[in-house]
Image: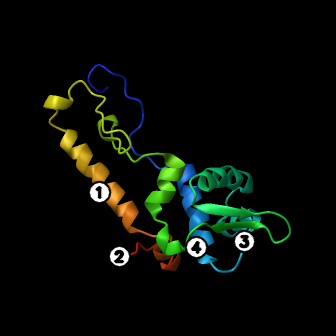
Amino acid sequence: MLGNQPASGTAFHVTTRGEYGMRLMVDLARHWGDGAVSLHAVADREQLPEAYLEQLVGALRRSGLVTGKRGAGGGYILAKEPGAITAGDVVRALEGPIATQDCCDESDPVARCVLERNCGTRAVWVRLQGAIARALDAMTLADLAAAPPASVPAR
């Protein structure tokens, strides 16, 4: 609990939406310039459920990160070049604002804790939120697509 309010569960956590969506976006980045990529092909390569990818691509389209092409040869492509889309863009599109605790949600700077004025730990959560946001925003899809599997690109 925060102060006298129940915890809302907004602490930062990457769900399967974020994980699978990131894998989808990195796959699209790896195939940048090849034309539209079908979700079936992505699902096969990434061993992900195609029906779930169909759900995720809606949020990615609404966020302006992918565009779709219907008909023969249809599928999805990144809406911008891979170097112009960050991991942070993808996470925010699928998971919402980055927040380690309710009191430091990046989309709503209004504290939701009655203890905020005298809180000895809020600085920890604010710094952690900033570090997570900076790390995600420092990695582009181009970086991730070029990285060998299981490595973290240095920036």
**Residue topped by disc 1:** 131
Amino acid under disc 1: Ala
Left of 105 or right of it: where is 40?
right
Q: State how far apart marks 4 and 3 are (Cα).
A: 11 Å
Amino acid under disc 3: Ala
**Disc 2 or 4, which lies upstream in sequence?**
4
What element does badge 4 sit on? helix
Q: How is the image coloured?
A: rainbow
Q: State how far apart marks 3 and 1 are (Cα).
A: 34 Å
What element does badge 1 sit on? helix
**Disc 4 or 3, which lies upstream in sequence?**
4
**Residue positioned 48% across, 45% down in the render:** 96
Q: State how far apart marks 2 and 3 are (Cα).
A: 29 Å
What element does badge 3 sit on? loop
Evaluate if marks 4 and 3 touch, with contact meaning CB atoms under 8 Å apart.
Answer: no
Identify whether 97 is placed above or below 44. above
Q: Choose top left, top right, bottom left or bottom right for residue 27.
A: bottom right
Q: Position of residue 55 (x, y in %)?
A: 68, 49
**Residue positioned 58% across, 73% down in the render:** 29
**Residue topped by disc 3:** 36
Evaluate if marks 2 and 4 touch, with contact meaning CB atoms under 8 Å apart.
Answer: no
Q: Position of residue 32 (x, y in %)?
A: 62, 77
Left of 101 or right of it: where is 8?
right
Q: State how far apart marks 1 and 2 are (Cα).
A: 15 Å
Residue found farthest to the right: 72
Amino acid under disc 2: Ala
**Disc 3 or 1, which lies upstream in sequence?**
3
Q: Choose top left, top right, bottom left or bottom right for residue 23.
A: bottom right
Between 102 and 9, which is closer to the camera in this rendering? 102
Rendered image: mark on residue 154: 2
